[in-house]
Image: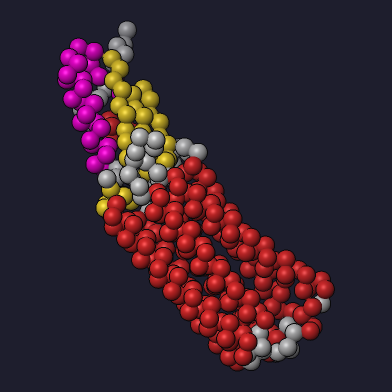
Amino acid sequence: MKKETGTIQVAETEFTRVANRVAFVTIFENVLLALGKLIAGLIGHSSAMISDAVHSASDVFSTIVVLIGVKLSSKESDKEHPYGHERLECVAAIVLAVVLLLTGLGIGYDAIKNILGGNYKELTAPTVLALVAAIISIVAKEAMYWYTRYYAKRIDSSALMADAWHHRSDALSSVGALIGIGGAMLGYPVMDSIASLVIFFFIAKAAYDIFKDAIDKMVDHACDEETEKAIYDAVLEQEEVLGIDMLQTRIFGNKIYVDLEIQLDENYTLKKAHDIAEEVHEHIEQNFPKVKHIMVHVNPAVKDH
């Protein structure tokens, strides 16, 4: 069995290996960042940086969810699950989307509370150390976003892609911390809360996109029109196929299932019709690696009267 994406075919074992490596790199990075931010926040008198440290520490939980999702989704088909376990990765992506949204809501709530309550007036001006820590966090998190995104696209993992966007949300959160720290140092601590409120909308949008993509893969959503048209044209490339009565597609996790009814000459023997259907079946699976299974039904061609 293979895990496939686009023209790239990655063995199932490599899919798991790549996902595990990315996840462990993420955990290591988040632990280092959390400790660094906490120390910088305490020494640099920055509550924003301390909050950002807690945020990075909580990301370890999200990465563990990714590891579990990838592990379960890569299991072979069995008697109870004859179509495989790919959808379990979508479940992991949904969990991450919820965690991401809750994180954003927390940031937005604190921002509004500080703006309306004037709590920012009580903040102590942070030091340059906190400012430097915020810059390092932004660079590190943005690098992790592109790193995770690359491998998520390579192995077509929705859970890893969700984790990549989690890194991007962390980078935005650190941007808010940077603006807030800089503003506080310049005598405008309210900038911290205003920046956090803007960041909340970015995080909420990312959570929505991740959630929608996972749900589409969970409910047998059809492929996009471009993919269906390409499959349709590929079927008609077979000379013996005289027409297509039905073509339906559904997305199962990150795989595609196809149901197809083709027209063949009614005078063909059962064996010849079967052989042509097999040729169509193999042609589609070879040219569309994300197609995990295709069911081909043969109908006699309708004669013109």
Is residue 72 toward the left or the right of residue 238 in the image?
right
Q: Does the segment drawn in magenta span residue 273?
A: yes
Quarter of the image that includes the C terminus: top left
Q: Is residue 89 visible?
A: yes
- Give the answer, above or below, for where 183 lies relative to 227: below
Query: In percent of the image, x 29 and y 52: which residue is there?
Result: 12
Query: In percent of the image, x 63 and y 90: which residue is there?
Result: 44
Q: Is residue 228 visible?
A: no
Q: Quadrant of residue 123?
A: bottom right
Q: Nearer the viewer, residue 279 or 133?
A: 133
Q: Nearer the viewer, residue 211 or 72?
A: 72
- Give the answer, above or below, for where 277 lies relative to 167: above
Is residue 101 toward the left or the right of residue 70 in the image?
right
Image x and y of residue 76, in percent:
32, 44
Q: Nearer the viewer, residue 246 or 123?
A: 123
Image x and y of residue 187, in percent:
74, 89
Image x and y of residue 286, in percent:
24, 41
Seen as rendered, the residue at the extreme top is: 305
Q: Does the segment drawn in magenta span residue 164?
A: no
Is residue 17 toward the left or the right of residue 126 in the image?
left
Instruction: Give the main secondary structure, helix, strand or loop, of the magenta stretch.
Output: helix
Seen as rendered, the residue at the extreme right is: 117
Report the magenta residues as a range.
262-287
Quarter of the image that includes the N terminus: top left
Image x and y of residue 246, in percent:
38, 25
- Give the answer, above or below, for where 218 lies relative to 153: above
Query: In percent of the image, x 55 and y 72: which residue is there?
Result: 57
